[in-house]
Image (spheres, rainbow, N blue to C red):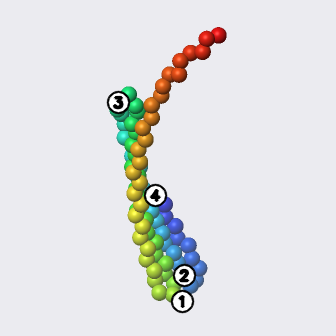
Amino acid sequence: MSATRSGDASSSVFSGSVGAAYQGDSRQVAGARYDWFTSGTVGGAVNQGSDLPSEQQANVSLQLGHSMSRSWRTGSTPT
């Protein structure tokens, strides 16, 4: 989680965000390793100034991903 406030005498900016991530357990599928994950973030910002009208922003981010891998033995080389 993060939050920020900055500004001078004529304007102020307030912003913050919170996020989370999860990685599932690895699974064996047809001799291969399968992994997946998800993560997300929600945030927002407010800009208040005496010279400009107030501005509000919101953002949402979501990621999903997966991978599958398999290793093969290539055989030994005679010496």
The residue that mark 4 highlights is 1
Q: Residue 64: horizontal and vertical position, in percent?
A: 39, 51
Q: In this figure, which residue is indicated by the disc labeled 1? A: 51
Q: Secondary structure at mark 2?
A: strand
Which of pointers 3 and 1 indicates the residue nearer the eye?
3
Asked if residue 64 is positioned above or below residue 58 in the image, the reply reads above
Q: Amino acid at mark 4?
A: Met
> From the viewer's perspective, is residue 62 above or below residue 77?
below
Q: Please give the label number shown on residue 42.
A: none
Amino acid type at mark 2 = Ser
For marks 3 and 1, give the CA distance. Answer: 64 Å
Q: CA distance from mark 2 to mark 3?
A: 60 Å
For badge 3, the amino acid type reads Ala
Q: Which mark is residue 11?
A: 2
Decide which of tag 2 and tag 4 comes sooner along the chain.
Answer: 4
Up the image or down, 21 lies above or below 77; here it is below
Q: Secondary structure at mark 1?
A: loop
Going from the N terminus, do you reach mark 3 or mark 1 first? 3
Q: In this rendered view, identify the residue nearer to me: 14 or 79.
A: 79
Q: Mark 2 and 1 residues: CB-CB less than 8 Å, in contact?
A: yes
User: What is the CA distance from the residue labelled 2 to the residue labelled 1?
Assistant: 8 Å
Precedes in sequence: disc 2 or disc 1? 2
Label 4: how many Cα within 10 Å (few below 14, some 14–19, many 20+)? few
Mark nearest the camera among 4 and 3 is 3
Q: Earlier in the sequence, mark 1 or mark 4?
A: 4
Q: Are marks 1 and 4 in contact (CB under 8 Å)?
A: no
Residue behind mark 3: 30
Residue 46 or 63: which is nearer the viewer?
63
